[in-house]
Image: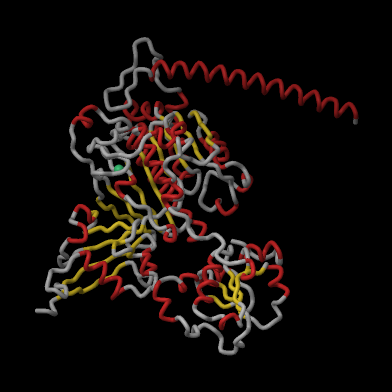
Amino acid sequence: MESASASAQALREQIAATEARLQKLKDELAQVEASDAARYLNGLSLNGGPVTPQNGSAKWPLLNEEYQRYGRQMIVPSIGIQAGQLRLKSSSVLIIGAGGLGCPAAAYIAGAGVGTIGIVDGDTVETSNLHRQILHSTSKVGMRKAESAISYLKSLNPNPTYIAHTEHISPQNAQEIVERYDLVLDCTDNPASRYLISDVCVLLSKPLVSASALRTDGQLIVLNSPPLPPGNEAGGPCYRCVFPKPPPAESVVSCGDGGILGPVVGVMGVLQAVEAIKIIVEGKLAPSPEIQEGLKATPTSMLLFSALSPQPFRSVRLRSRRPGCFACSKDSGLSLEGLQSGSLDYVLFCGLASSANVLTPEERIEAAEYAKIREREHLLLDVREKVQFDICHLDGSINIPFSAFQGGAKAENDGKVPTWLPESLPKEAPIYVVCRLGNDSQVVTRKLKESGLDSGGKRWIGDIRGGLKAWKQQVDENWPEY
Amino acid sequence: MASETIPITVEFTGGLEMLFADQRKHSLSVPAKDERGQAVTVGWLVHYLCVEVMKDPRKEMFVLDGHVRPGILVLINDADWELEGEASYALQARDNILFVSTLHGG
Ligand SMILES: [Zn+2]
């Protein structure tokens, strides 16, 4: 036995030494290749002019492996090698968000041979991401998304330089991150980051490809392209030109709340990669002098994708730069210094949904406490949308979706007994309101009490703190959480 | 003459259809003139939709402070209404008016 384990140990050491030597050789090779490519690419122009190799450079500007890897796209007439592949190789793309948009976008950007790829994401991989965030996998749950994405991309194409930014984009770090790249893809999921990213791209003159998706719909828009300085009307419009005012926070629905079909957001991410490759290959990363001089306004368009519509794709014409735009007009109120100093609060600008504590502690009950009084006469009102109620609900609960309690028309019903209230329910039997996480249930509880359903305090109305998530944690670990 | 109408198509997308009985496309016949005898405009149409078509009580998700709420694009025959005179654009027969709520998920 002892000699067997000794020889296993010897083999392990031999393998380790061989691996180290192999790695050293690979590093040496990479250095030699990089200096070859750098010598060639020095002569390369990114903004439209002809691309010519410098005298004395290597005979072939790409590695042998790269001719094979990119051959199928290089022989597409609108790509080619000079304007196409070499520009891709010498360009850098920043992908902000490694989620449902960022994952497919990054896969195609890396596959196409973009030279430097940055991924920004502060989140970690969750199981609920996997149906659409195709760079992550079951074994990567809990890992940083930026790192998980890059490990996939490296196995797809080891040639590009990958940079992981494992933090969320913020006014403080935005300049430092974005200024290292030529082009930005906004693959984030909230209005505050969309305004921030657009502002930074305007200030740093980067074209921006922005997409979003929810349920079965997607939207795609190319912004700040050409990326001319603020005040130059020939530049492409920015996010603020199209949406000068943010939507009210109550109207903003996340994928977590509204749902998302995987391939729908996938289509939008893939389209972002298409637009990015077009901008690079067409030499539009930096505007050519002719564009800068011709002060012709450049309108943009938005591509709408509705998976359920008989004509799923539709392109609509949008405006050019907005005179007086806060970000990109000559009256711009933006500056890099202002951004750094935090003078712009993007979260405040976009407003906070009022999900904080609406109710007092006396108006709420813990899930574990509620479990104990289930036998008593009461009504359990589940205010999740019907599609969620159908997935799972507690026995005996009735479903009136949150949306039915919204809106000004409610006032007309004040003082009347709602039709959904069972006639058999005694006047003083308590009503417990439950939802998924314990936010909507508070709002509904407040509305019910304001409408007089609590009979002036004789009937207790309150919500289950933390919703059905708390029910799973405190009462029933087998409860299906979706 | 007062009963003269014009046929138009109104569409909702980006989730707005949920406020309009989950119906994306509405073929409408609207009066050609408003109460004061003026040709009807897109601004008039927004009010009309709010009062006559929208059954959902969440009016503020469509119109806020008398204007189409921020975050909704209005497109007249697939062009931003800001290119067409915004609310003052006079409706023509067979116009297509599309309301798009911006999405933010990713
Ligand atoms: Zn602008």
Residue A74 drawn above or below residue A365: above
Q: Residue at x 32, y 36 (%)?
A: A279
- Taking the image as drawn, is residue B35 in sight? yes
Q: Residue furthest bottom?
A: A424
Mark count? 0
Residue A267 visible in the current orientation: no
Q: Residue furthest top?
A: A56
Q: Residue at x 18, y 65 (%)?
A: B41
Question: Up-down: is A210 above or below A456?
Answer: above
Measuring from the top left, give residue B2's x and y in whole percent: 12, 79
From the viewer's perspective, is A165 left or right of A234?
right
Task: Give the residue at the far front of this rendering.
Answer: A456
Q: Quadrant of the N terminus of chain A?
A: top right
Classify residue A155 by image quadrant: top right
Q: Measuring from the top left, give residue A85's x and y in whole percent.
A: 37, 29
Q: Position of residue A270 (x, y in %)?
A: 41, 45
Quarter of the image holding residue A64? top left
